[in-house]
Amino acid sequence: MATKHYTFKGQKPGEEVVLLLRRHWLTQLKPLGFSLIVCLVPLALWFWITQQLDFIDIPGQYIWGAALVWAAFGFFFIIYNYLDWYMDVYMVTNFRIVDVTQNGLFHRTVGEAPLDHVQDAVYEIKGIWPTILNYGNIIIHTSGPSGDIMFEEIAHPQDVQRLLLDHVDHYKDANTEAPATAEDLLQLMLDHERQNLASGKKPVEISPPPAKLNLPPA
């Protein structure tokens, strides 16, 4: 997913998001299914108990209250898992790679690496469902203290790897200065001498190397 209009905390002036990624939405089916079961159990329990009220002396409002509390817990679990998925973000900007990991509601870890520190990136797809549905991990090898960065369970990892490496190569080519040639050095010296003459400074004189001494043989 590419967007230049996405903003985030700590964004630098002139920084734009080139790739914005999250874990594949199918990875949320398991916690979503568990949450739905948690929500449906109190309804089934309430229906069963209401059929047994003839010999179980429990007021109906207590049953409703317990069912609502249980359902609220299941709904909270759904919201919690959604926020955890939504706030886990992998970004590639025009300056760096950013990995935002949300651990619970009040704990966030942010890792980053400049694009010129990226050395290589490989992707892996493990398991039956990831192979069928085409999602997996990308491991980005970087130099420096940041270490490796992993994009986990993202869709179409092979395409993302190619786009990432192309973007890194383009960045390095655009920000690598060509080595100075002899003509560039000569022009720099001439410009420096012109500035000295214009300011009234004495030109720099280069002394010839000392003559080789002819010493008598020992």
Image (cartoon, rainbow, N blue to C red):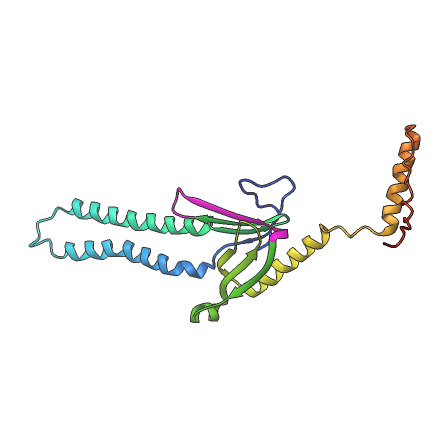
From the viewer's perspective, tell me whether residue 27 is left or right of residue 200. Answer: left
Image position of 7 with respect to 149: above or below: above
Residue found at the far top of this picture? 200
The region drawn magenta spans 103-117
Image position of 107 with respect to 118: above or below: above
Q: Give the total of numbered labels.
A: 0
Q: Position of residue 65 (x, y in %)?
A: 21, 45
Seen at 57% across and 46% down, the residue is: 6
Q: Would residue 130 be visible to someone looking at this image?
A: yes
From the viewer's perspective, tell me whether residue 164 is left or right of residue 61. Answer: right
Which quarter of the figure is the C terminus placed in?
bottom right
From the viewer's perspective, tell me whether residue 137 is left or right of residue 14. Answer: left
Seen at 49% across and 67% down, the residue is: 125
Q: Position of residue 122 (x, y in %)?
A: 55, 64
Quadrant of the rendered image containing residue 31: bottom left
Work out whether residue 150 or residue 35 is closer to the camera in this orientation and state it. Answer: 150
Residue found at the far front of this picture? 218
Q: Is residue 71 magenta?
A: no
Q: Position of residue 188 (x, y in %)?
A: 86, 43
Seen at 87% across and 37% down, the residue is: 192
Residue found at the far left of this picture? 55
Seen at 57% across and 61% down, the residue is: 121
Work out whether residue 181 or residue 72 is closer to the camera in this orientation and state it. Answer: 181
Which quarter of the figure is the N terminus placed in?
bottom right
Q: Would residue 160 be visible to someone looking at this image?
A: no
Quadrant of the rendered image containing residue 200: top right
Q: Is residue 110 magenta?
A: yes
Q: Position of residue 75 (x, y in %)?
A: 33, 49
Work out whether residue 188 or residue 77 is closer to the camera in this orientation and state it. Answer: 188
